[in-house]
Amino acid sequence: MFSSKKTDRWRSSNSRLIGLYALFFVAWGGAFTGVLYWEISAYLGTVAERTLMQRAHYYQKVPDAALVDELAGSEVYSTPGIDAYGLFEASGNHLAGDLLKLRSNLPDDGRVHYLERGLSIALPNEETRSSYALRLNRPDGRILILARDGGSISAVGGIIGQALFWGLSLTLIPGLIGWRLLRRRPIRRVERLQRSTESIVSGNLRERLPLSPRRDELDMLASAVNTMLEHIEQLMLEVKSVCDGIAHDLRTPLTRLRARLYQLQKLPLQDAHAQTLNLALEESESIMSRFQGLLRISELEDTRRRSAFQAFQPEALLQQAHEFYEPLAQEKNQRLMLCLGGEYPALQGDVSLLFEALVNLMDNAIKFTQAGGEIHLSCWRTEHSLTIEVLDNGPGIPVHERKDVTRRLYRGDATRQQPGNGLGLSLVAAIARLHGFGLSIKAGSEGRGTRVVLDCPLSGVTTGFLNNY
Amino acid sequence: MIRALVIEDDEVTAQAIIAELEAHGFSAQWADNGRAGLAMAIAGGHEVITLDRMLPDFDGLTIVSTLRQLAIQTPVLMISALSDVDERVRGLRSGGDDYLTKPFSMVEMIARLEVLLRGPSPDNHGHCLEFGRLHVNLIEHSVTLYEEAVVLLPTEFKLLTYLMRNAGQLVTRTMLFQEVWGYHFDPGTNIIDVHIGRLRKKIERSGAPTIQTIRGSGYVLVEKN
């Protein structure tokens, strides 16, 4: 029922805001550098194209015979590794220049083209690089290729990429540190509020939500809740004091009534009178048992009883309950089986009350199961809880009555003829509620019988709650 | 005649208690408020006291703790309209010897007073209990009847020893449940009868002590005639 789950750090509004902001910043930075890269590379491409076209125009005017010398002479002034040329025969054989191979994928249209894989240049250890190139067909059939290195665009891309990386790092890293620092305090406060709320939910109405000196929006909310709690506690105290008053005022007259009836019983009476008196005494017993039962449930609603909680071993309690009821089951020719498996962790609770709950459950199981039936008292451990189950193969509780049976004084249609006051399961429910245990009533195996399950969480407010007392 | 002091502010309840006490051979004195009750208790001359928890002037807790401080060890049965478990613990811690919650049955009250009067029963012979031909060794947890061993379950053993310690006296179901199982609520079923029935069968011999059922009240271990 109670769990102190830590707040999921990504669910805080601060985290979401900072995450959204970071996403926006990364997208904006990416778009900005993308546009920058595109603009710069377009500009550098135009510059390379113009240079190549200028060189092409110049060499077009040079006569074929003087071309080789002119090329050798002019290219001395060009930047090595940036500008290059290659002169080839029509068949593709290399005649002169740094470019050694005629690339067939370079279109023969007199325009500048960008080649991703570039051209091979006869320089030591030179790798194939991206480049701009232009093919010129000479009147004598030779082919002149003029090229300019395209690496500067990649370099610009690299610089812009680095700028983006540093820009994002320098913004996101301090952002993340700031987020962590900013997140910690509100989360801690929310966790403190959560702990207090769980304690209040579990019945500790004296607990109040913690307030900080900042008087921020969380404090405003906590303060409003605290005022509400004051009123609720006041109302509950008033109701309890009225109930206590009624209880006290009724106990004395009931004691008197019984005393007078017993006094009467001692007088010499006629048979008919004695019989009526016995009936009156039985009625007074029945009133007393119901009254005691109702008072007991009311007492259990007062969660201050948790101050009597202590650690105990559930198997000892179950064994005792089994031993207690085994003779009665045997007398009714029923089989009462205790199914324990392995070691169980200690539970926190009031042993006496839990024994009372088990007594009620087993009493019901034995009472409503036919002779020759079977009753199982079992206990097993799941990951977060310990489950105690009382299962019988009796007539079971109809689905529409399962919710009502824990109501005070409720008696099902099929059970009205049986002895009882309709308080047993209400008492079990009150004890379960006091301990923070889950109580569920289901059908037994194959839809027959009754299965009552007490689900006892192993960690939770019950343990933490004790520390407040 | 056993002299009892009844400290109870409600006249009708007090009269009923006194009538019941007198019917059981007690002589009873009545105090209707805390101050008079304390004075009478200190003056002494009583073997047992029934004390209401809530009284005018001094409440029951104050009276019993004052008596104990003055080293007056008269057994006190506290009777209270407060049934809370904490109240019971508080009552016993203050020096009360037993605690009864209103509304209570007179039979229960007398049975508890009888047990209180007997006091913490010393074992008949050191670590042994004997009643008629029944013999219980508390160290070895063994029972013999007519020199023959009787095998009892732990619960049956506890039931028998409690009955033997209070042999001849009425013990109620609530008292047995409290003493043998250690719980203070009313189990509300005939379960105690079933346990007693089992024990009864095991010690059933002609001429041996027997457990008599007193209808609507409890049981008494008696010698068979």
Image (cartoon, rainbow, N blue to C red):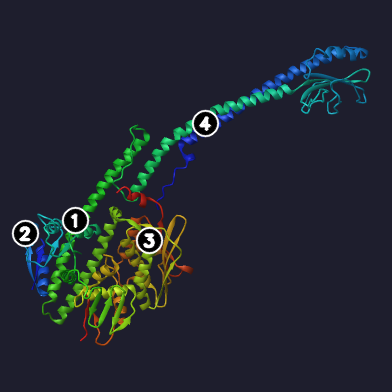
In terms of sequence position, does the residue under pointer 3 or pointer 1 come before the other?
Answer: 1
In the rendered structure, which amino acid carries the disc numbered 3?
Gln
Q: Are marks 2 and 3 on the same chain?
A: no
In terms of sequence position, does the residue under pointer 4 or pointer 1 come before the other?
Answer: 4
In terms of sequence position, does the residue under pointer 4 or pointer 3 come before the other?
Answer: 4
In the rendered structure, which amino acid carries the disc numbered 1?
Gly
- CA gap, disc 4 and disc 2: 82 Å
The residue labelled by disc 3 is A313
Task: Identify the secondary structure beneath mark 4.
Answer: helix
In the rendered structure, which amino acid carries the disc numbered 4?
Tyr
Which chain does the residue under circle 2 lie in? B
Q: Is residue B32 or residue B181 the one in the foreground? A: B181
* Pointers 4 and 1 in contact (C-beta within 8 Å): no
Q: Are marks 3 and 1 on the same chain?
A: yes
- CA gap, disc 3 and disc 1: 37 Å
Q: Are marks 4 and 3 on the same chain?
A: yes
Q: Is residue B71 or residue A313 the one in the foreground? A: B71
Which chain does the residue under circle 3 lie in? A
Please report the residue visible at 30 percent of the width from the left and 44 percent of the height from the top: A229
The residue labelled by disc 2 is B39
* Pointers 4 and 3 in contact (C-beta within 8 Å): no
- CA gap, disc 4 and disc 3: 53 Å
Q: In this view, which residue lies farthest toward the front?
A: B126
In which quadrant of the rendered view does residue A157 lie? Answer: top right
- CA gap, disc 4 and disc 1: 62 Å
Task: Identify the secondary structure beneath mark 3.
Answer: loop
Q: Residue B107's x, y, as percent?
A: 18, 72
Q: Residue A225's x, y, as percent?
A: 32, 41
